[in-house]
Amino acid sequence: MRVVKDLKIFSKDDFPKYLPKLHSLYDDLFSAGKGFRSKLIQRIGKHLSLNERQELLLAQTIEFIHNASLLHDDLIDRSALRRNKTAAWLKYSPEYAVLAGDYLLARVMVNLSRFGNLRLIQYTAEMISDLLEGEWIQDSLMRDWNVQLNQLDQVHDLKTASLFKWCLRAPFIIQENYDESLHQTLDEMGSLLGLLFQRGDDLLDFDIRNDEGKALLGDLKSGYLNSFAAFLARNFKEEQKQLLRKCETLDAVKALVGIAEFNRAVQEFDDLNRQVIELYDHKAKSLESRLAPEALGLINDLMGLPSLLYFRKSR
Amino acid sequence: MSTEFITLTKNDPDFDSYLWGTFSQTHRALPVETYHAATAKERVTFRVLTLEKVAAPAWWKVYFWSARPELFGLTLGPAVAAWLLHVQSINAWTKWPSWFALAGLFFLHTAVFLANDVQDHLRGFDRLNHRRGSQVIQKGWVTASAMKRWAWVNFALAVLFGVPAFLNAPLELALVCSIAAAALVTITGKYGVRFGACDLSLALLFGPLLTTGIALASFGEASFKDIALGLSFGFLTVWVFQVRQFEDLFRAKAENFRTFFGHLSFDRARKFALIEGIALLFIPPAAGVILNLQLGFLLLSPLVGLPLIFTLRRIYLAASPLSSSLADLSKWSLASHLSWTAWWVFALGVAWL
């Protein structure tokens, strides 16, 4: 079994040299990323004995799509920063940000069609359309201060979870393993992983397990009630919601809610997500009958993911 | 202790017994996740709990909630209004058929909504959207199988109480029942959903068929006025049901659920609901003119329409099927129905007094 190593996702040789600013834009974009999704591909790939070409193709595909969505997302949200750097649409231009994102998506299709697995191309295209639907619908929820957790979950299933589903399923598809019940289970697991990742990420906004130092209250300030904010505000009266949206600092949020109530909400939110993790573990265990004996180690690896994604720590 | 889950697909031999709740006498299976509902690929994950852990309330409380008391206005409102319309036959109120018709209608209402809960549980509607239906099956308080039995018992009681009332006007009521049966077949078979046939059938059932049926069963007579009154209620009721489809629009796409609004795009459904809603501000007063209501009540109608106007505002503000302004639309639309029902009952009641 191979170990997970650093893959070079972005190579300047893959992109034309005559396009001004493209290389430097991509350099900025890819150099600061954690490459979490490509590492997930590798983590799964090592159990399935993917060859290097397959692994690189999948890792590049997911990272290109993810980064294309970030380029577009920052412009839609008018976010000034991406990974603590000036966002591409501000540093270069909105036009270049859109084109650079489109170009990454085009490269994905070029690379996949060169490889020639039609099912993988179809599934990837479906994933991109889910992602865009999620972005579209999320935009309609901006400044919607009464949105509820279950509504946000539906958006995140399209916007965030579609990428996780792809990470879990694509390594099997590239090996031409199309077992329907296996893919159904992986799809459901991806859905739960996406949910947990998004909820964990939304907690960072409120400085919960924020080891990576993410800027606080970014969503709230940009007019978006994220999943934890929606959970926190679930029993708020209208005037409390009005005050919440005006909060500029975390201390102001805690003062509004009360520190004890805030901490209790975090605990209840964690408990809620522990139930999601239990459900995820149930699904992971059910893979046992669907995997080849040499790939069974994957189950253990997959079962460690929810803690990593939600609690941001290895189990 | 960790939770016990079980995932079953439609072709699994145990699938139906878990869905119906007949797999065990000591445990209940609560559906926590449903994929590909109402298709051959359907897949449901259940959380299996002992009966003690389910902690169901007393059976009569479960029965009460399953009967959907919040929707009583949709059936009893038009019925009471239809009675009050027949002021000239008011002496007949003391006759048994009137009271039998009332009891029959109560049991019929309960039977219909219990059966609907079972059907929506099996089809996945209520498993996917926990704001729909009474949710007593999904909470494990009662099994789908038991609820189906309850529905039959209530239906039998409705028939039992309906027979004496039926004898008041057997031929006319047979015609009403035949049209109602055709409407029910259209709704349960989902025929012509795309063209609004199901919604039109609902309008007939909760409108003219209900008011003329009650008039015939209670007094042995019905006129075009009962139809006018029924149309006013029917269109309002179908609108109440239609706006509830908004919150399923997003899911309708994913799970291929078939509803009239599901076939329209969100934008078109929203426009349709707004136009219908605006028309509904004028339909009851127009029916009131036909029924010779007192001018004072007609002048009150803009005030009565306020909940409807608030509901329309929420629909107008919705930017997408997931907008929070649509979240409480069920309550608002029911309040709209209730306000018009109260208006009718007061207006016809005053005429009676």
Image (cartoon, coloured by chain):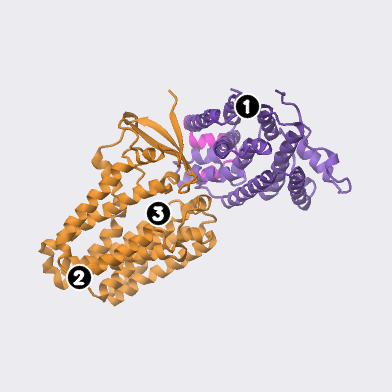
Chain colours: A purple, B orange
Q: Which residue is mark 1?
A: A295
Residue A83 visible in the displayed image: no
Residue B306, compared with residue A163, is above or below; it is below
**Residue type marked 3:** Ser
**Residue type marked 1:** Ala
The chain carrying label 3 is B
Q: Marks 1/2: CA distance?
A: 72 Å
Q: Marks 3/2: CA distance?
A: 37 Å
Horizontal placement of B170 versus A91: left or right?
Answer: left
**Residue mark closest to the camera, 3 vs 1:** 1
Q: Earlier in the sequence, mark 3 or mark 2?
A: 2
Q: Which mark is residue B171?
A: 2
The residue stretch that appears in magenta: A242-261
**Residue mark closest to the camera, 3 vs 2:** 2
User: Where, quadrant-wise, is the C terminus of chain B in this rendering?
Assistant: bottom left
Horizontal placement of A312 versus A89: left or right?
Answer: left
Q: Residues within 10 Å of mark 1 (few under 14, many from 20)?
A: some
Q: Residues within 10 Å of mark 2 (few under 14, many from 20)?
A: few
Horizontal placement of A126 versus A227: left or right?
Answer: right
Q: Which residue occupies 41% across, 70% down?
A: B279
Identify which residue, B125 or A81, lies in the foreground.
Answer: B125
Q: Which residue occupies 84% across, 40% down?
A: A12
Identify which residue, B5 or A196, lies in the foreground.
Answer: B5
**Residue type marked 2:** Leu
Pinpoint residue B155: horizontal percent, then vertical percent: 24, 53
Dominant secondary-structure state across the stretch colored magenta: helix
The chain carrying label 2 is B
Magenta run includes residue B322: no
Q: Which residue is mark 3?
A: B330
